[in-house]
Amino acid sequence: MKAPICNVCLKSDVLCSSCKEKYENGEISDLEIEISRTLQDLSNEYGSLRDSEIKHAYDTANVVVIVTAEGDGAKVVGRSGDIVKKLAEEIGKSIRVVEKSQDDKEVIKGLLSPAEIESINTVFSPDGQYKKIVVDEDYEGKINLSNSEFEDLIEQITGEKYELSFE
């Protein structure tokens, strides 16, 4: 399994000097370390985790968002969501797994599920341009993320500024 921390640190309770430096610089968080080590432990039971990659983990008020490498989302979720259920019990919050993708729309779909995107429009404003994601108003309050949490997350994951709108 590839994680934000090295294989030695995955199996140890102490961080090596390289991982400790990443931690002190804010490149990795306590949450990412905890998730990586828990998934490493679960990889003995679930072989699919052995060739998966965890990129980042983000903590919000209601949910923990785990970003995997492209194609690794299903491996981390597990059959019938078994792995994610065990991880959620360990962390104490619900988990949402999103695959990192070259196409921002795929990442957005993963974060908004079960809501579907109606449109993504480029908006030009005096402060610069951003993209507006329009979702049916029936899904407002059903995605476990506030608008600001979603907008912060999507900017951290994709590097693009998006605004979420329910219409």
Image: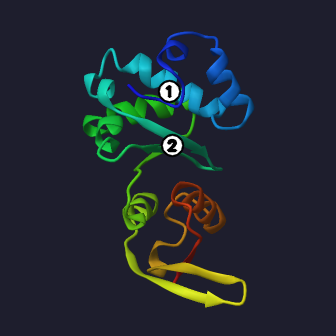
Of residue 127 and residue 18, the one placed in the foreground of this image is 18
Q: Nearer the viewer, mark 2 or mark 1?
A: 1
How many other residues sit within 10 Å of disc 2, few (<14), some (14-19) or many (≥20)? Answer: some
6 vs 156: above or below: above
Which residue is at a point 40% across and 68% down the rendered structure image? 115
As helix, strand or loop, the secondary structure at mark 1 comes to helix
80 vs 108: above or below: above
Residue 107 position in % (x across, y down):
42, 59
Q: What is the quadrant of residue 17 in the picture?
A: top right
As helix, strand or loop, the secondary structure at mark 2 comes to strand
Q: Which residue is mark 2?
A: 94
Q: Image check: 7 left or right of 150? A: left
| Amino acid type indicated by mark 1 | Ser
Which residue is at a point 58% across and 62% down the rendered structure image? 155
| Amino acid type indicated by mark 2 | Ser
What label sits on residue 81 in the rendered view?
A: none
Q: Image check: 56 left or right of 72? A: right
Residue 96 position in % (x across, y down):
46, 47
How many other residues sit within 10 Å of disc 1, few (<14), some (14-19) or many (≥20)? Answer: many
116 vs 42: above or below: below
Q: Is residue 167 visible?
A: no
Q: CA distance from mark 2 to mark 1?
A: 16 Å
Residue 1 position in % (x across, y down):
38, 25
Which residue is at a point 54% across and 57% down the rendered structure image? 144
Q: How many marks?
A: 2
Residue 116 position in % (x across, y down):
37, 72
Q: Which residue is mark 1?
A: 36
